[in-house]
Amino acid sequence: MAMKIRLARGVSKKRPFYSIVASDSRMPRDGRFIEKLGTYNPLLPKDSEERVKMNMERVEYWLGEGAQPTDRVARMLEAAGKRDKSERNNPLKGTHGKKAQERIQEKEDKAAAAAEAAKEAEEAAKAAAEEATAAPAEDAPAEEESAS
C-alpha cells in the first residue's frame, strides 16, 4: 500500500483549515485516512506557533514506514528541521502566460519599428544636411555683389 502524508481540507468555504494525515495514496484528498498527524491553519500569521502543529513522533514513524510527504507537507517538515531541504525543479514557474508573451512580443516589435523609423529619419536628416552644405556654394549669389 502506497502511503502519503498529506493535507486533508476541513471546515467551510473560504475558511481553509487542513488536517495533516497519513493515508493511502489511492484515497481522495478529504476521504478516508489512517491517522491524523497534526493541523495546518493558513489563516494565522506565519510566525504563529498555532499555524502548523504536528505530532513529530508519529510523522517520523510513518516516514520510517515508507510514507511519502506531499510537497507542502515536505516544506513544513523542512521548516521544522526534520527533513533536509530538497532541490525543487519548476522551470516554468517564472515564464509568462501565452497572452502575456504575445503582448510582450507586440511591444518589442513596436519598439523595434520605432527605433528603425528614428534611424531612417536620422539618416535622411544627415543626407539633407550634407546636400545643404554642398548646394549653397553653387546656388547662393555672391555676397560681393549685394555689398556694393
Image: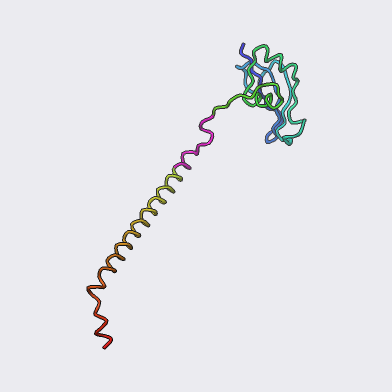
Magenta region, main secondary structure: loop
User: Residue 84 appears in which quarter of the rendering?
Assistant: top right
Tell me which residue sits at (72%, 35%) in the image. 46
Q: Residue furthest left?
A: 138
Asked whether residue 93 is drawn in magenta, I would say: yes
Q: How many circles with numbers are drawn on the protein?
A: 0
In this picture, residue 92 sits left or right of residue 69: left
Q: Residue furthest bottom?
A: 148
Q: Position of residue 107 (x, y in %)?
A: 44, 48
Position of the N terminus by quadrant: top right
Residue at image location 65% in from the left, 26% down from the top:
75
Quadrant where the image shows the C terminus: bottom left
Q: Nearer the viewer, residue 30 or 71?
A: 71
Looking at the picture, does residue 1 appear above or below residue 104? Answer: above
Picture quarter containing residue 143? bottom left
Q: Position of residue 63 (x, y in %)?
A: 67, 15
The magenta region covers: 90-101
Q: List x then y, in percent, for residue 6.
A: 66, 22
Spot occupied by residue 73 in the image (x, y as percentages of width and height): 66, 24
Residue sitting at x 71%, y 18%: 59
Residue farthest right in this picture: 49
Q: Foreground: 28 or 35?
A: 35
74 or 41: nearer the viewer: 74
| Colouring mode (rainbow / by chain / secondary structure / one colour) | rainbow
Q: Is residue 133 magenta?
A: no
Horizontally, residue 50 falls left or right of residue 5, namely: right
